Amino acid sequence: MSKIVIFASGSGSNAENIHHYFKKIDNIEIACILTNKEDAGVIERCKRLKIPLFYFNQAAYSDGSVLKLLQTIDPTLIVLAGFLRKIPVEFISAFPSQIVNIHPALLPKYGGKGMYGMNVHNAVKLNGDSSTGITIHYVNGEYDEGAIIHQAQVDLNGTETPEEIAQKVHGLEYEHFPRVIEKILLENG
């Protein structure tokens, strides 16, 4: 049985999408979702979907408690789905090539600290890009610099608002992220 642990800081729409995708697959399960935000929308989604959820504060993240929890669960893959904290090097060492992230741009464009969500979509609009997309990549010690696993692109006509750009990018996330996760699990299983 392959076990996925998801980290999420926001609404949890990607986490829910991943849950629905893998609900139909017998040998892959969402073991739990972890969040660092007391008011994150993902909390209500977990209650509704009956997914185990763990909230942690910065102290638990820094003192090794979260890492110990992960080692107890022993996930096959750790998925960052809108998680806005840098992953400590201790996590990366404990789970080498087992932590993946999704970024709402075609890296290396619009990557790095502070480049997430609407910050990215506003930058795409401001620069008049004719396309944007998503990048699914392994996590290393630097923001958005891990090895790229998959990219998907969508064309822009220049009239979209940042919110419309975000909708197009979310569509790519929902379509590609679960399938790429499954592919990683099958290749490494």
Image (cartoon, rainbow, N blue to C red):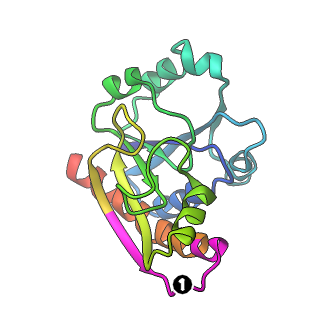
Horizontal side, residue 95 vs residue 160: left or right:
left
Which contiguous range is marked in magenta? 151-165
Q: Look at label 1 and name its amino acid.
A: Gly
Where does residue 163 sit, x and y in percent of width and height?
Answer: 66, 72
Q: Residue at x 42, y 22 (%)?
A: 71
Please state the total of marks drawn on the protein image: 1
Nearer the observer, 69 or 144: 144
Q: Residue at x 38, y 59 (%)?
A: 135
Per the image, the residue denoted by label 1 is 158
Residue 183, how many percent across, how many down? Answer: 29, 59
Residue found at the very far front of the displayed protein: 127
Q: Is residue 90 above or below residue 28?
A: above
Expressed as whole percent of the image width and height from the top left, the position of residue 17 reads 55, 62
> Dot 1 lies on which element?
loop
Q: Residues within 10 Å of mark 1 (few under 14, many from 20)?
A: few
Specify the quadrant of the image occupied by residue 62: top right
Magenta-colored stretch includes residue 172: no
Q: Nearer the viewer, residue 118 or 13?
A: 118
In the rendered view of the protein, which quadrant contains the N terminus?
A: top left
Q: At 43% from the left edge and 61% from the top edge, which residue is drawn?
A: 177
Task: Report x, y in % for residue 131.
Answer: 43, 77
Name the side, left or right, on which 22 lies relative to 83. Answer: left
Could you tell whether 24 is left or right of 126 in the image?
A: left
Q: Farthest top residue?
A: 63
- Residue plotted at (50% across, 87% down): 157
Q: Is residue 37 left or right of residue 171?
A: right
Q: Nearer the viewer, residue 4 or 23?
A: 4
Q: Residue furthest left?
A: 187
